[in-house]
Amino acid sequence: MKPLSEKFDLARREALAALDQATDSATVEQLRIDYLGRRGAIPALFREMGGLSPEQRPVVGQVANQAKTEIQAAVEEALQRLSDTATTATLDLNLDPTMPGRRRRVGKKHPVVQVMDEAIDIFRRMGFIVADGPDLETEYHNFDALNTPTDHPSRDRQDTFYLADGRLLRTQTSPVQIRVMESQEPPLRIVCPGRCFRRDTPDATHSMNFHQIEGLYVDRQVSLADLKATMTVFAHELLGSEVSVRFRPHFFPFTEPSLEYDFSCIMCGGKGCRVCKYSGWLEISGAGMVDPAVFQAVGYDPEKWTGYAFGMGIERIAMIRHAIGDIRMLYENDLRFLAQF
Ligand code: PHE
């Protein structure tokens, strides 16, 4: 037969578990009677204590008293808990379940961020690694190291935001090329997404703050054909395989030869429409083969290394993709506009 103290302990545990599970006060009352009432389990066990030896009695007595007080406390606690629930239940009756609920608006990615993320993803799949640089740049990284002559118009205070300490808000993501090449040896293949700033008067196609994604690939024997292939794959992945790419000669201080590339108009398929100003082509960005002077500035041997670079405006692509007529709409934060993307 089980020792008496074990029986007390078992009754205590059973009672506490049952009280914990109870969901209405009638059940609690019944449990109180079953365990603590005159004919209940605990008093019955107390009566058995008569048969104990004088040494055993105080030991079992302690377990017995503990069982009794714990069950009493648990009964109180259960009654308290159930009366709280009862109040809530009454309150609920005052609610009108036919009232429309509160709507929570779910956020979305901004169209500029969408294009940026997709572009990064496409270049990642082609083996490019994402690099980052500061928005506040030195004149050296934004202009000098990029082979930009001291009298170049883009350096003008009318075009560039300068700080009192001589630093500037970068006008392009190209300075990140310099920072990466200063700190790493070739070969490398990077893209740098980021914000750029120019002192333009805002209009339908200009904003003082816009985004670019820059690309740079340096290795042995990189050619224009590599650039063209990369841009073509990019165009197909981003806008569809029917898009064609064309290069036009251009000039940038940091590339030689330099070019601009266009995508065939995705609105009219190249036939000519308002979006492409009836030319069939959309101007996307600048690119070219890295000028040897740039390699010299970062300490790369121009006899050994070749590379291409490109930089494109993200807003421009978002506008083409969604037929947005005015760049300012992207920055007005009008939810009626943004909710469409
Ligand atoms: N940085 C140039 C611009 O902002 C674009 C460019 C990048 C051109 C890389 C050539 C190579 O217009």
Image: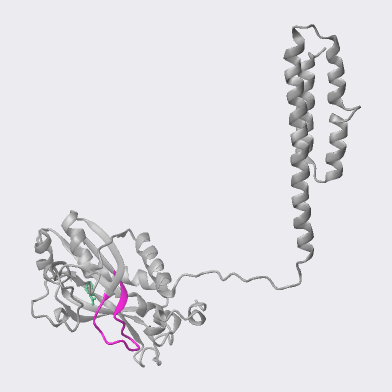
In the displayed structure image, the side of residue 112 where residue 91 appears, left or right: right
The number of numbered badges drawn on the structure is 0
User: Does any portion of residue 219 appear in the rendered image?
Assistant: no
User: Does any portion of residue 88 appear in the rendered image?
Assistant: yes
**Above or below, comparing residue 213 to residue 284 in the picture:** above
How far across and how far down the image is residue 301, in percent? 10, 58
In the displayed structure image, the side of residue 331 where residue 86 appears, left or right: right
Outermost residue toward the right?
39
The quarter of the image that holds ligand 1 is: bottom left
In the displayed structure image, the side of residue 52 where residue 336 appears, left or right: left
**Above or below, comparing residue 174 to residue 7 in the picture:** below
Say which residue appears at 14% left-offset and 83% top-offset. Answer: 153
Mainly helix, strand or loop, the magenta region?
Answer: loop
Say which residue appears at 51% left-offset and 79% top-offset. Answer: 340
User: Which part of the image, by quadrant, shows the N terminus?
Assistant: top right
In the displayed structure image, the side of residue 129 where residue 218 appears, left or right: left
How far across and how far down the image is residue 240, in percent? 43, 74
Q: Nearer the viewer, residue 313 or 157?
A: 157
Res 46 quadrant in image: top right
Say which residue appears at 73% left-offset and 19% top-offset. Answer: 62
Q: Nearer the viewer, residue 211 or 123?
A: 211
**Above or below, comparing residue 285 to residue 326 in the picture:** above
Span colored in magenta: 197-213
How far across and how far down the image is residue 253, in percent? 14, 75
Q: Nearer the viewer, residue 330 or 58?
A: 58
